[in-house]
Image (spheres, rainbow, N blue to C red):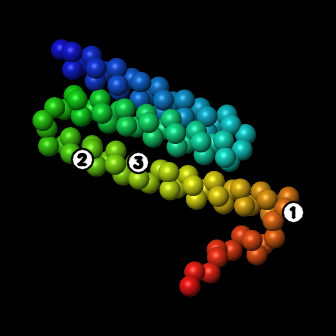
Amino acid sequence: MIINVISATLLLTGCLLAVTAAIGLVRFPDTLSRMHAATKPQTFGLLLILLGAVLRLGDNVDSGMLVLAGLFALITAPVVAHRIGRLAYQEQRARDGLMDERDMEAPDRD
């Protein structure tokens, strides 16, 4: 009984965070702000939803897949957000004339 209450609380909290992330994507004005809304609350909301589902499933075989999905989200979301943020920052500086086109190229690695 108590596991069901905890699971429902985690699921509802995760859904609330996912909704706030979606609202942030629509409402925020620039790419960097939208990137923040897309990664931080969305990833945490997803982890809460997955944790609630794992608690609800108990010893089911599918719990392992939910754990793997959570790990995949934790690994990929920061990397994608970093790449998008870096590209948006470089593009903005190039448009403002603060950065030369050569500065945007990747450094040569020997």
Give amino acid for label 2.
Answer: Met
- Judge left or right: residue 41 versus residue 90: left
Residue positioned 71% across, 70% down in the render? 104
Q: Where is residue 61 in the image (x, y as percent from the top left)?
A: 14, 43
Give amino acid for label 3.
Answer: Leu
Q: Position of residue 41 (x, y in %)?
A: 50, 35
Residue 97, numbered label: 1
Residue 65, numbered label: 2
- Judge left or right: residue 58 versus residue 26: left
Q: Regarding mark 1 in the picture, which secondary structure is present there?
A: loop
Q: Where is residue 29 in the image (x, y as percent from the top left)?
A: 73, 40
Residue positioned 43% across, 33% down in the render? 45
Q: Regarding mark 2 in the picture, which secondary structure is present there?
A: helix
The residue mark sitting in front, 2 or 1, is 1
Mark toward the start of the polypeptide (2 vs 1): 2
Q: Regarding mark 3 in the picture, which secondary structure is present there?
A: helix
Check whether the beta carbons of the residues at disc 2 and disc 1 lie within 8 A of each other.
Answer: no
Around disc 3, counting alpha carbons within 10 Å, would you say few (fewer than 14), some (14 to 19), or many (20 or more)? some
Residue positioned 81% across, 70% down in the render? 100
- Identify the image quadrant of the C terminus: bottom right
Residue linked to disc 3:
74
**Of 9 and 82, which appears nearest the observer?**
82
Mark toward the start of the polypeptide (1 vs 3): 3
The residue mark sitting in front, 3 or 2, is 3
Gap between marks 1 and 3 measured at Cα: 35 Å
**Of 108 and 7, which appears nearest the observer?**
108
Q: Position of residue 49 (x, y in %)?
A: 35, 32
Which quadrant of the structure image shows residue 4? top left
Around disc 1, counting alpha carbons within 10 Å, would you say few (fewer than 14), some (14 to 19), or many (20 or more)? few
- Judge left or right: residue 40 versus residue 13: right
